[in-house]
Amino acid sequence: MVPEHAKAISEFLSSTLEMEAKTTARVISAVPAIGVDYAPDAKSMKALDLAWHIASAEVMLLDMAIAGGDAPVAERAPGTDTAEGVVAWYQQHQPAAMAKVRALTGEHLAKVISVWGGAFTLPTVSFVAFALNHSVHHRGQLSAYLRPMGAKVPSIYGPSGDEGMGGH
């Protein structure tokens, strides 16, 4: 991959991820206090654990792009024992990581890196795409938890059964 292409791809993905972050925060915010321990199956993550996974993994994957290699998974931060706390953490850390990603050079973004002991060997910019795809995937999973918990499903890509376009 040439640096100019990597930078252009990163700009597109960054704009998309910044837009998606608003929806991700709304879905996490919809987790009710009485539903934090809900899981549809014993093999599934509990709702609050899934919310934390979405928020922390997105930042970790962006940090991997920034570092050009492995980055640590954030330990469960103090104050993230509620959906509101997870959203507050996410809204503090995700934009900061996005600003750093936007500042990366095309050369950095085009460099091929290997992470997790060689599990993935890809151009650095691929980890911005991975952050986007991972968050959207798990956000859909969390949104499917909401109604069984007695919560309302926010508008995501259009109206939900509970909310009109864009949260109206």
Image (spheres, helix red, strand yellow):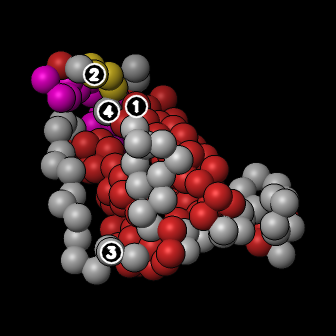
In reply to whether residue 77 is colored magenta, the answer given is no
N-terminal of the pair, mark 1 or mark 3, is: 3
**Residue named by callout 4:** 124
Tell me the distance, in whole angstroms, between the alpha carbons under discs 1 and 4: 5 Å
N-terminal of the pair, mark 3 or mark 2, is: 3
Amino acid carrying mark 3 in the image = Asp
Picture layout, residue 84 above or below residue 48: below
**Residue named by callout 2:** 120
Amino acid carrying mark 4 in the image = Thr
Tell me the distance, in whole angstroms, between the alpha carbons under discs 3 and 2: 32 Å
Picture layout, residue 121 above or below residue 66: above
Tell me the distance, in whole angstroms, between the alpha carbons under discs 1 and 3: 31 Å
N-terminal of the pair, mark 4 or mark 3, is: 3
Give the residue displayed 68% in from the left and 60% down from the top: 147
Give the residues drawn in magenta, as a range: 105-117
Tell me the distance, in whole angstroms, between the alpha carbons under discs 2 and 1: 10 Å
Under circle 4, the secondary element is loop
In the rendered image, residue 130, in percent from the top left (x then y), is placed at 43, 36
Amino acid carrying mark 2 in the image = Phe
Quadrant of the rendering where the C terminus is positioned:
bottom right
Instruction: Please report contact status of discs 1 and 4: CB closer than 8 Å, yes or no.
Output: yes
**Residue named by callout 1:** 126
Q: Nearer the viewer, mark 3 or mark 2?
A: 3
Tell me the distance, in whole angstroms, between the alpha carbons under discs 4 and 2: 11 Å
